[in-house]
Each structure stands twice: as structure tokens, then as C-alpha cells.
Amino acid sequence: MPKMRISVLRLGHRGERDKRVSTHCGLVARALGASEIILCGERDEGTEKSIEKIAEKWGGKFRVSYSSNWLKTLREFRGIKIHLTMYGEPLMRVVKKIKKRGKKILVVVGAGKVPGGVYHECDFNVSVTTQPHSEIAALALFLREVFGSQSYEKKFAGAKIIVTPSARSKIVEKNKI
Amino acid sequence: MPKMRISVLRLGHRGERDKRVSTHCGLVARALGASEIILCGERDEGTEKSIEKIAEKWGGKFRVSYSSNWLKTLREFRGIKIHLTMYGEPLMRVVKKIKKRGKKILVVVGAGKVPGGVYHECDFNVSVTTQPHSEIAALALFLREVFGSQSYEKKFAGAKIIVTPSARSKIVEKNKI
């Protein structure tokens, strides 16, 4: 499998209303191996900062940025563009295709109703189940299928906090770097 | 693999603040094959109803209920109790164990800080990555590992709305039952 670099484009962030859901999207993106999240919609530096702060503490290189023009960002992206929705092709079929082709991937997740243009601008519309659920879950499942179950064991360089898995204890290492 | 029945226990719901995240937990639970969600913390009939309404429209048998005493619910549950956290045993190791043993499973997901007792009452504390991310994603990934990728194709009996996966179109069937 070629090494993949995944960016996440979060559409239509609506300030206070989406603070937590967008933060969860950012943290899930990072934890499961994506390289960056680009937030669109209302500018919300609080959400950007809270994702950045966690990334800084927990290590790795994860980038958070804002785009005031999602369509431009989408059009200018050089790589495979994938829109996670309820109406697309089955997830596993698309994952098979992109694993062969993919190096750079942009994953688009919406908040609320997504502009129709997204469906046409993307190379794949991918349905993560055909049921209503959560863009956070859809993103997590997509990343899991692309990177495989080893993404659960991903290590992050330069972490100030490291958790060691344990059945009955909280084992946390804090590094003063 | 023995047929499994999974219940989700959502701890510490805090009214307005957790409305969307708890709703996402409920919808993810349903979409990926769990049988019910039990909400704890502040009673919030709005959240209960919004999950129920979607379950009714989209089919299947998914139960939503409220428990004012999570400890009692946890103690009285007959089956394997699993707590999703950042500090537990690695996900894949635990999934292997419960696939052999499991019939009835209770999955516990917290909001905010989880009472220490949860760690001791549960048979397994499971870490879905050792990174901070999202209880919605953790739940989705857990269900995916237990039920396998075929859970993306799950059909729901008696649905009033059915989506047919499609690369470029929204194909929605509405049944007047």
C-alpha cells in the first residue's frame, strides 16, 4: 500500500453550536492518522486552538487551519477528494479503490446540510452505512478502513503525555520537553 | 461467532451541553448494530425523543431508555461489561476475547470525567487508541470491530426511509407504512 497523507475538510462550522462536534472531528482525525484538519464556515479560533493545544501536548505533527472558501480549497486540492455522506457508494468498495490509487486524500465532512456542489467536486461520495448517525463516527470509520486496525496503536513523536494501555490502571507518563 | 446483543450505557449526560454528542452516540449505536442506549445523568427527554424518532423512521428495533442510577444498572446487567476509555487494554486484544465469550454486552461511554467506580465495575476497560478523541468515535470503532465491516451494510426492518448507495445520486425510498 502506498503511504497516504489524509487531510480533513470540515464544512459549515457554526460557532457555538458545532464547537464540540468540530473539536471531536479534529481529535479523531489526529488520533487515527490524518495529517490536518481545515475548518470552514464561521471562523472559530477557540475550536482551532483547543485542537492545536491537544495536538501539541500529545505529540505528532497535526495541522489545524481555516479556509473561508471551501470550494476553492476543494478545487485546488491535488489528490483524491472523498465526501462522507449517507448517500454515496459503500465504504468498503471505495476504500479498496483508493488503497491502490491513493497518496494524497482530502476527506470532506459536513455539518448540517451540505451544498450540492460538494457531491460533484469530489471524486467519491462514500456512504458509511446508509443510516443517519454522526460525521465524527463516519470520519473515524473511514480512517480505520484506510489505515487498518494498526492505527489504534499509532505512536506520536514528541508527546508530552503518553498513555500506556492497562487493564486496571491509568498509566500516564508526563514528559517535560 | 455467537450472536451478540449490545447495549450502550451513556454516563453523565449534561442537558444542553451534551444534547448533540449523546444523540450522536445513540444514532451510532443503532446504525452499527447495537440494540439499545440507556442514558444516565440529567434526564433529557428531548434527546431521548430525537433518537427514538429517527429509529422509528429508519427502521429496526432500537430501544432508548433512561436510568437515574448508573451504578445499579451496571451492577444488575448480566453479561460482559466494557468501559471505553483512553487508559484500558488495547481494543483489538479485548475484541478477540469477547468474540469467543460474548453474548450480551454492555458498553459504557462517559461524558466528561467518569466516576472511578466504572473502572472496577466493568469486566474490561478498553482503550480505543491511547489518544484523546471522541466517545462517539470510540463507540463506532468498538462496534465495527465486534460486528465486522458487514455492519456497514446492515438492513433495518420496517424502515419508512431507505437509502440505496449510489456514486452520484441521492436515492431515497420513502415507504408509507
Image (cartoon, coloured by chain):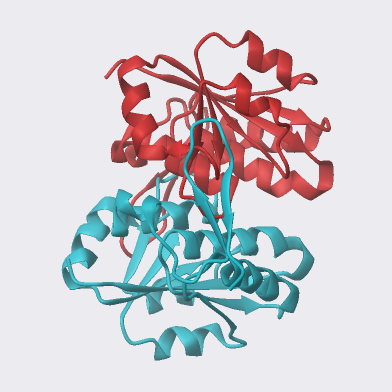
Chain colours: A cyan, B red
Answer with the quarter of the image where residue B13 lies: top right
In the rendered image, which quarter contains the N terminus of chain B? top left
Task: Classify B105 as above or below B41.
Answer: above
Toward the viewer: B69 or A93?
Answer: B69
Q: Is residue B35 above or below residue B55?
A: above
Residue B67 in percent (x, y) is at 75, 20
Comparing A57 with A148, the one in front is A57
Quadrant hosting residue A101: bottom left
Residue A132 in sight: no
The correct choice, above or below, for B39 with respect to B22 in the image is above
Residue B75 at x, y = what percent? 65, 12
- Image label count: 0
Percent position of residue B163, x then y? 41, 46
Residue at 83% over, 41% down: B15
Give left or right: position of A49 versus A61: right
**Position of residue A147 measured from the top left corner of the image (x, y, whole percent):** 30, 59
Decide which of A11, A6 is in the foreground and name it: A6
Residue B71 visible here: yes
Measured along the vertical axis of the image, is residue A70 above or below residue A10? below
Please indicate whether residue B61 sits to the left or right of residue A147 in the image. right
Viewer-side residue, A136 vs A153: A153
Q: Quadrant of residue A49?
A: bottom right
